[in-house]
């Protein structure tokens, strides 16, 4: 069961990178149709909303994941632990992927360097979500 869960975790993790590349490609083509001036009221509003989403989603996703995993550690059934861990891992990845993909799309449309910094911040947060088998065992207190 641990092996299957770990494969799903890794798959979900790398899907975010695939989505990032696809968002970049879509943003490139969207840029040919729509370009927003970064100093325009719309551009400033979009950038501000994106930064706020980044500032809320990443810490909230990490904290909620941490709290829920600490509760999962107390469960006796290993299958329940792993299914819960997979569920909350998906939520954490979604919380980090949302500002990551939004920042990439806005970088392409608005062409402001602050959006590429937001991509970098979310990318660094994503690195902390990389599934490692020993880390999963330690967080869930699973002994083989």
Image (spheres, rainbow, N blue to C red):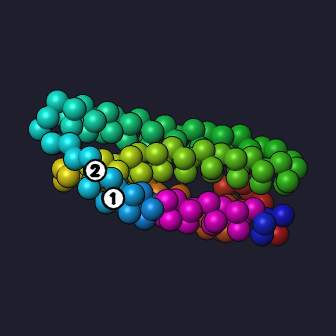
- Residue sitting at x 71%, y 40%: 71
Above or below for 74 versus 32? above
Residue 52 showing in the rendered view:
yes
Q: Which residue is mark 1?
A: 29
Q: Is residue 47 magenta?
A: no
On-image quarter of the C terminus: bottom right
Structural crowding at the residue carrying mark 1, measured as other residues with C-alpha within 10 Å and reported as few (<14), some (14–19) or many (≥20): few
Secondary element at image label 2? helix
> Is residue 74 shown left or right of residue 130?
right
Residue 101 placed where, x, y %? Answer: 42, 51
The span shown in magenta is 5-19
Work out whether residue 70 or residue 28 is closer to the camera in this orientation and state it. 28
Q: Which residue is mark 2?
A: 33
| Secondary structure, magenta segment, majority class | helix
- Residue sitting at x 22%, y 47%: 35
Give the CA distance from mark 2 to mark 1. Answer: 7 Å
- Residue sitting at x 61%, y 39%: 67
Residue 91 placed where, x, y %? Answer: 60, 44
Tell whether label 1 touches label 2 (CB within 8 Å): yes
Above or below for 110 versus 116? above
Residue positioned most to the left = 39
Instruction: Name which quarter of the figure residue 125 lies in.
Output: bottom left
- Residue sitting at x 65%, y 45%: 88
> Is residue 70 shown left or right of residue 83?
left
Residue 36 placed where, x, y %? Answer: 20, 42
């Amino acid at each position: 069961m641990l092996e299957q869960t770990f494969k799903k975790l890794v798959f979900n993790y790398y899907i975010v990178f695939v989505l990032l590349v696809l968002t970049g490609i879509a943003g490139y083509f969207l840029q040919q149709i729509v370009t927003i001036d970064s100093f325009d009221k719309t551009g400033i509003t979009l950038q501000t909303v994106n930064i706020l989403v980044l500032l809320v989603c990443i810490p909230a996703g990490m904290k909620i994941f941490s709290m829920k995993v600490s509760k999962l550690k107390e469960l006796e059934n290993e299958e329940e632990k792993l299914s819960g861990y997979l569920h909350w891992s998906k939520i954490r990845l979604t919380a980090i992927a949302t500002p990551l993909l939004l920042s990439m799309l806005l970088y392409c449309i608005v062409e402001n360097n602050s959006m590429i910094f937001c991509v970098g911040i979310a990318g660094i947060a994503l690195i902390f979500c990389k599934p490692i088998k020993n880390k999963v065992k330690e967080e869930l207190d699973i002994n083989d």
